[in-house]
Amino acid sequence: MAEQNQVTKSSRGNVQRSEQTEVQRGAGSEQRRPDGVPAMLPPVDIIEDEAGFTLALDMPGVPKDQLSVRLNGDTLLIEGAIVLQSFPENIELVHSEIRDPYYERSFTLSPELDASKIDAKFKDGVLQLRIPKAEEAKPRRVSVKVA
């Protein structure tokens, strides 16, 4: 079961991330893709400002051509495959701590966000997503006229 996170703002103005999983998992832990293949859950930082949210996901070992960011309705799905180093025939790998060379994480986006304007940047194994708030959800100043 893939983990679903919802990116919203509470009534007090701080970010809420509601986990919708059978078992809560720690950052970087394992989960299963729908096809049964094990996947690692990339750790994420979520930052909010007046204009929107920034998500930073750590996905070391994933080349850009193996990274996928898709939007399906209000669900943002991030996937990436790690390219493992190949060794010459005469060298045998005796220990490896990478069991599942695949990352997957999904988020349910709040209606207050403008999903059509998501911006993604990938550098040094860190995927940074900028999700702006919809214009009607941004704080604005109301001018007061003297009557």
Image (cartoon, helix red, strand yellow):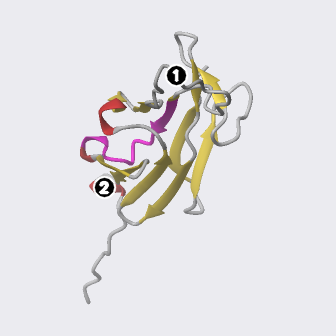
- The percent position of residue 99, horizontal first and vertical second, equals 62, 26
Q: Residues within 10 Å of mark 1 (few under 14, many from 20)?
A: few
Q: Classify mark 2: residues with Cα within 10 Å, few (<14), some (14-19) or many (20+).
A: few
Query: Does residue 105 belong to the magenta stretch?
Result: yes
Q: Quadrant of the C terminus?
A: bottom left
Q: Which residue is mark 2?
A: 136
* 47 with respect to 65 (left or right): right
Residue drawn at 43 percent across, 31 percent down? 80
Nearest the eye: 140 or 78? 78
Where is residue 141 shown, x and y percent of the image? 32, 75
Q: CA distance from mark 1 to mark 2?
A: 62 Å
Residue visible at 31% across and 55% down in the picture: 136
Query: Element type at marker 1?
Result: loop
The image position of residue 131, as x and y in percent, is: 35, 50
Q: Is residue 27 above or below residue 136?
A: above
Tell me the kind of residue under disc 1: Asn
User: Which SS class for mark 2?
Assistant: helix
* Residue 28 drawn above or below residue 145: above
Dot 1 corresponds to which residue? 90
Q: Answer with mark 1 or mark 2, whichever residue precedes in sequence.
A: 1
- Percent x, y for residue 126? 43, 50
Q: Quadrant of residue 97?
A: top right
Magenta stretch, residue numbers: 103-116
Residue 70 shows up from this direction: no
Residue 9 shows in this picture = yes
Q: Is residue 69 left or right of residue 94?
A: left
| Residue at horizontal 42 percent and vertical 55 percent from the top | 53
Q: Residue furthest bottom?
A: 146
- The reply to whether dot 1 and dot 2 touch (C-beta < 8 Å) is no
